[in-house]
Image: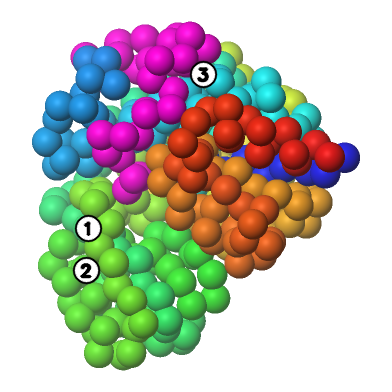
Amino acid sequence: MSTLAILCSGQGGQGPGMFALTEGEAAAEPVFRAAAALLGADPRALVASAEPGALHANRTAQILCCTAALAAWACLGPRAAPRRVVAGYSVGEVPAWSVAGAMTFDAALAVTAERADLMDAATPGPSAMAAVRGLSPANLERVRGEAGVHVAIRNGPDQAVLAGSRDAMARALAAAEAAGAAKVTAIPVAVPSHTPLLKAAAEAFAGRLRVREDVRRPAARLLSGIDGAAVFDPRAGLQKLARAVAETVDWAACLEACRAAGATRAFELGPGASLARMMGGLLPERDCRSLADFRTLEGAAAWLREAED
């Protein structure tokens, strides 16, 4: 029996169609109700009517992304292969805990809202994030250091996400382009996630997680975002989850850990499909899919069933 990698997306893919395949499913209804209590509106109605900028406000965005992953998993989890490894990108690490069986879906949503609130409160001023591709580690480090920004996420040998104050990020991106970066892409996130600028948020989040009693040992292999290591002790894992707020996420290590755990296929729960594309660099592209690739839930479920063969 093959191992399936389940990937929980981060921010950036929110939009009107993010719940298109799950919005009418009875299995996802409890997830939508729990999210509505945190958002003050049904997430399905919110994404259909809100201005695009509103969907990228940090708290709203984090809850929506968590909701998307959990709603998809509520529908597809019972039909997925039992042997799996689970990883989450940035805020996606929180719903990954629920997908791996370490906390309930409503606990994951509550933790996500708490995380977002603490990050917003700790953000020192206007901030920005951007993906940079095509610079060597040495050049990236030089650009980062001279501009005064931080590596928030490592996606690969020459792929990273930078974060910092808005002014410092403008300097960094101009320098990256001048240094020959193949691509520079702004990310619609206005907090300096995964950087020391959010140390106060990470410390406060650690304190909140320390007293939670609704966590348990993962039923599936769950990876920590900051290093790709498996979570065996939920208490230690929660502290690493908190540290990730102010420390670099090593997504490249998470992808390698999925492969090392025997994953032969990968499925991204969404929103978006960027993680499936990244995993396609390690596994055959045909074996890496996202919910966004399918027109129906049944089509996604049929692909997942193939992973059992």
Q: Residues within 10 Å of mark 3 (few under 14, many from 20)?
A: many
Q: Secondary structure at mark 2?
A: helix
Choose between 25 and 29: the one closer to the eye: 25
Residue 226: in magenta span: no
Q: CA distance from mark 1 to mark 3?
A: 29 Å
- Residue ID at (52%, 59%): 277
Q: How many marks?
A: 3
Residue assigned mark 3: 105
Residue type, numbered disc 2: Met
Residue assigned mark 2: 169
Residue type, numbered disc 1: Ala
Residue assigned mark 1: 128
Residue type, numbered disc 3: Phe
Q: Is residue 255 above or below residue 84?
A: below
In the rendered structure, which disc, 1 or 3, sits on the residue that comes first in sequence?
A: 3
Q: Which residues are magenta?
A: 11-40
